[in-house]
Image: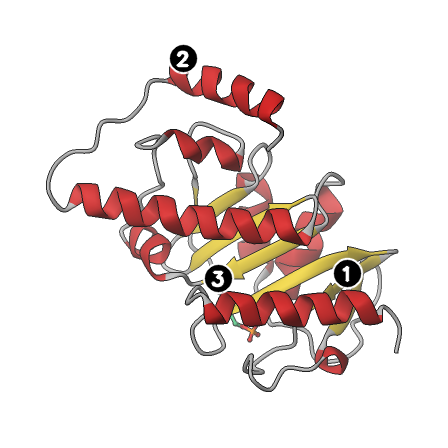
Amino acid sequence: MDHEAERAALVTAYRALKDEGLIVGRAGNVSLRVADGLLITPSAVRAERMQPHDVASVPFEGSARGRPSSEWRFHRDLLAARADLCAVVHTHSVNATALAVLRRPIPASHYMVAMAGGHEVPLAPYATFGTEALSAAIVATLHTVDACLLANHGVVAAGATLEVALDLAREVELLATIHRAALAVGDPVVLPPEEMDRVLAAFRDYGR
Ligand code: 13P
């Protein structure tokens, strides 16, 4: 079996997301760049049953080996479009998806939205799962930031490493939880663009 360490890392990542409650049932998938393509978690396999040999391989050109996640297309297209990214995480984590169902991005109600690389965690328009239309919407939305909500669907978070992408998926869920809690009692104050520019500059030094 090729890429044994990477396959094991993807299974470990998927199980961690499940144990942390970000993945429920079979809703979610994780991918990692390898030479000429990516490895991705299999479609419709529960975390408890998933094994490294179930991980599928999707080349940038040509057809997949194994049974890749039904969302392989946006993982592939995003990694092809963004040479700086090596890992992609998709979840239906509850609080972020609740905002996505309301078709609301996560604004700068907390300065940590800068972790995604911009002034908000944006919302990609709705398209049916697994389609080219969804992939195009995600690639366009993640042109300058590394995470977004998907209308009526969930979250995508990406990073230069699997660890960075996982941490960003966790952070988006935390930010959505805080924002939802604040919305329940009032109107959250959103930080102005000039402050978010300062935070982004500080993050560059901090090493996000
Ligand atoms: P897969 O099991 O095919 O990865 O699909 C789950 C999912 O999250 C679809 O959006």
- Kindly identify which numbered label has been placed on residue 171: none
Q: Which numbered disc, 3 or 1, marks the residue that appears first in the sequence?
A: 1
Q: Which numbered disc, 2 or 1, marks the residue that appears first in the sequence?
A: 1
Report how far apart the C-alphas of labels 2 and 1 lie in the structure. Answer: 38 Å
Q: Which numbered disc, 2 or 3, marks the residue that appears first in the sequence?
A: 3
Disc 1 packing (10 Å; few <14; some 14–19; many ≥20): many
Q: What residue is rendered at 42% in x and 73% in y?
A: 24
Q: Amino acid at mark 1?
A: Leu
Q: Amino acid at mark 2?
A: Glu
Disc 2 packing (10 Å; few <14; some 14–19; many ≥20): few
Q: Secondary structure at mark 2?
A: helix
Comparing 51 with 118, the one in front is 51
- Kindly identify which numbered label has been placed on residue 38: 1
Disc 3 packing (10 Å; few <14; some 14–19; many ≥20): many
For the N terminus, the image quarter is: bottom right
Pointer 2 residue = 194
Pointer 3 residue = 91
Q: What residue is rendered at 37% in x and 48% in y?
A: 174
Comparing 41 with 150, the one in front is 41
Horizontally, residue 17 falls left or right of residue 56, namely left
Colour approach in the figure: secondary structure
Q: Is residue 77 above or below residue 81?
A: below
Pointer 3 and pointer 1: residues touching (CB < 8 Å)? no
Residue 160 quadrant: top right
Report how far apart the C-alphas of labels 2 and 3 lie in the structure. Answer: 31 Å
Q: Is mark 3 within 8 Å of ligand 1?
A: yes
Q: Amino acid at mark 3?
A: Thr
